[in-house]
Image: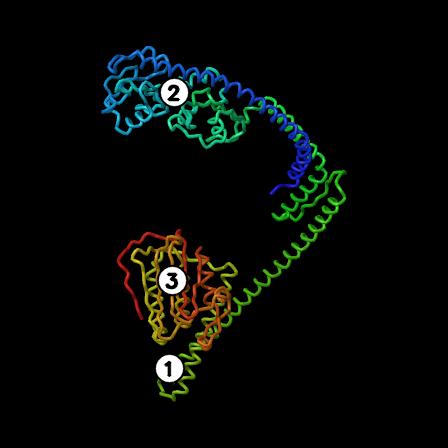
Amino acid sequence: MLSLKNTSLVTFAAIVAVPLIVFWVWPYSSQIDARIAEAGEHNLLLARSVGLSVEFYHNEVVSAFEHVIGEHSSADGAVDTELLSGLGFRYAGWVDEASGKVTAKFGVRADLMPEMYSLDDLAILKSRLSAGTISAIRVAIGADRQPELTLAGARQGAILVAGVSTSELVRLAQRINSNQAIVIDIVDGAGRIIASPQKHWELQAKDLSDFALVKEMQLGRQQIAQERMPEASGPSIVVALPAGDTGWGVLVHEPVGSASSAGSQTLTLSIAFLIILTAALVGSLATAPVVGPLMAVSRAARRMQEGDTDVRITKLGWLTPKEVLNLSQAFNAMAESVASSRAQEAEARAKAEQANLSKTEFLRNVTHEVRTPLNAIIGFSEVLLSECRRMNLPHRQISHAEDISSAGRHMLSLINSLLDLSRIEAGQYQLQETPTALDEVLARCVRFLGPAAQARKTQIEMQIAPDLPDIVADERALFQSVLNVAANAIRYGREGGHVIVSAMPSRLHGVEIAVSDDGPGIPAEYLDKVMEPFVRVASEANRNVEGSGLGLPIVKKLVELHGGSFVLESTVGAGTTARIRLPANRLLPRTDLAPAGQVAA
């Protein structure tokens, strides 16, 4: 995203660049067109010079070849290789017209001539020859994978075949052309490349017969046009010219970019760049009275976002526009309002914290005061229940005594939970950390909950990983956490159901304790709420189940005191899984790795 400063620079540069383009590009493009036309005329003269040289070379090669044929009365005489090598001949040799066998071969590269021509090649040579005539020169690829011109002539039942290197044609064109940007290609009558400085075009005998200029050249007409040559990145100025009566042609092509004056173009572009840069600097100075104050407002807003409520905008230049001044004043007013709101918020927070401390202190005092008489009530109820049973009193009286004892114990459990919660919230709960064997803690929880599980006909099972390590933890707090979660699973789970208490090492967490049931489950919208004190999920299944709504909040806080996390996962109708995850820094190596069994109740 562009800033206001950069946007102003770009805008002023664009304002200057538009007329610059209008008043410079159009005449400059006209100038380029003129230079391209001039380059075309120059390349036409170059093509004519090359065409005359090619025609002369062609005629010399044909004359020398015909001279060799004419001075031999038989097909077994030696060929004047010195005469031929001066014109680029690589080899020459006699081929028996009937069998295709080479009877004699000569030249500096006589090894490139095959020992035998196939019947197909022989048929092609015969179809182009009559006694005393020479075949048309055609391009071919020699045995050494180099392009060459093949000539053939007939004499007394034999055929003289010669190979001429195309490199002589390339050197001939290069001697005339001193500009490396200009490429000169020689094509045969079929529009295929005979000789080219682009060697791979020669090796492919590249076919350019589809080009309109080549077609005109084959009809004996010269052409100048802009064409996109194969493998070129842009258009080129192309001249196509027949090379006399040889049947060949000359193609001269030069990229359009090189036809223009590079020095003039560079100078013009430099001047344009300086003009645009000057416009950008002027734009920067012109927008400074607006951009500077706005940037000051932006910096002040960022500081306020970071928590600095005392930031104010005070120093602005005398050229600052009225609208920006109004903006700075509005910002200062907003900053005053935010500072006032934060002060009120801090005061309210302090009062709330004080009220919370008072509540915690009240709960602690009340629970201490209530526990003493409550313990007495529980004790006397136990004595009363024992006497009722000893005296064999009616069942109704024994039931009343049991209700008194059960209610007293439930009240004591609630008070103990309130006391634990208040101590944790007040930051007064100190962990007594010692090396702890997880399997022993879980086994004790399962044994402790055995009677409750039997009362609800619930099967409780323990699954311990064989490599479960010991941990450093508050054993009492860990026992209470697992006990609360497992008791909830039995209490709120399906009667006659199945509860699994498991523990295993975790790659993402140090160790994970999971308690799963197959009960009715908890709706997703209540998973976070049940972590709050005194919150219970009301349903037909648990309407008559006793509970204070403090068990899970206490578990969450005890686990977090250990640096871990407590997570609930539930699916309605399928059950609930509670996961206690303790960090890896609490793990200890196991001293006893005997396989842990399963405990069921």
Mark 2 or mark 1: whose residue is earlier in sequence? 2
Q: CA distance from mark 3 to mark 2?
A: 86 Å
Mark 1 or mark 3: whose residue is earlier in sequence? 1
| 515 or 94, nearer to the observer | 94
| Residue projecting furthest to the front | 131
Q: Are marks 2 and 1 in contact (CB under 8 Å)?
A: no
Horizontal side of 460 relative to 327 (left or right) equals left
Tell me the quarter of the picture where residue 31 sits. top right
User: What residue does disc 1 label?
Assistant: 386
User: What residue does disc 2 label?
Assistant: 166
Q: Are marks 1 and 3 in contact (CB under 8 Å)?
A: no
Q: Residues within 10 Å of mark 2 (few under 14, many from 20)?
A: many
Residue type for callout 1:
Ser
- x and y percentages locating residue 177 in the rendered image: 49, 17
| 245 or 549, nearer to the observer | 245
Seen at 59% across and 63% down, the residue is 355
Residue 338 visible, this orientation: yes
* SS for callout 1: helix
Seen at 32% across and 13% down, the residue is 70
User: What residue does disc 3 label?
Assistant: 514
Q: CA distance from mark 1 to mark 3?
A: 40 Å
Horizontal side of 492 relative to 223 (left or right) equals left
Q: Residues within 10 Å of mark 1 (few under 14, many from 20)?
A: some
Nearer the camera: disc 2 or disc 1: 2
Residue 253 visible, this orientation: no
Tell me the quarter of the picture where residue 280 sits. top right
Image quarter hosting the N terminus? top right
* SS for callout 3: strand
- x and y percentages locating residue 438 in the rendered image: 35, 59
Residue 46, above or below 596: above
Residue 347, above or below 529: above
Residue type for callout 3:
Ala
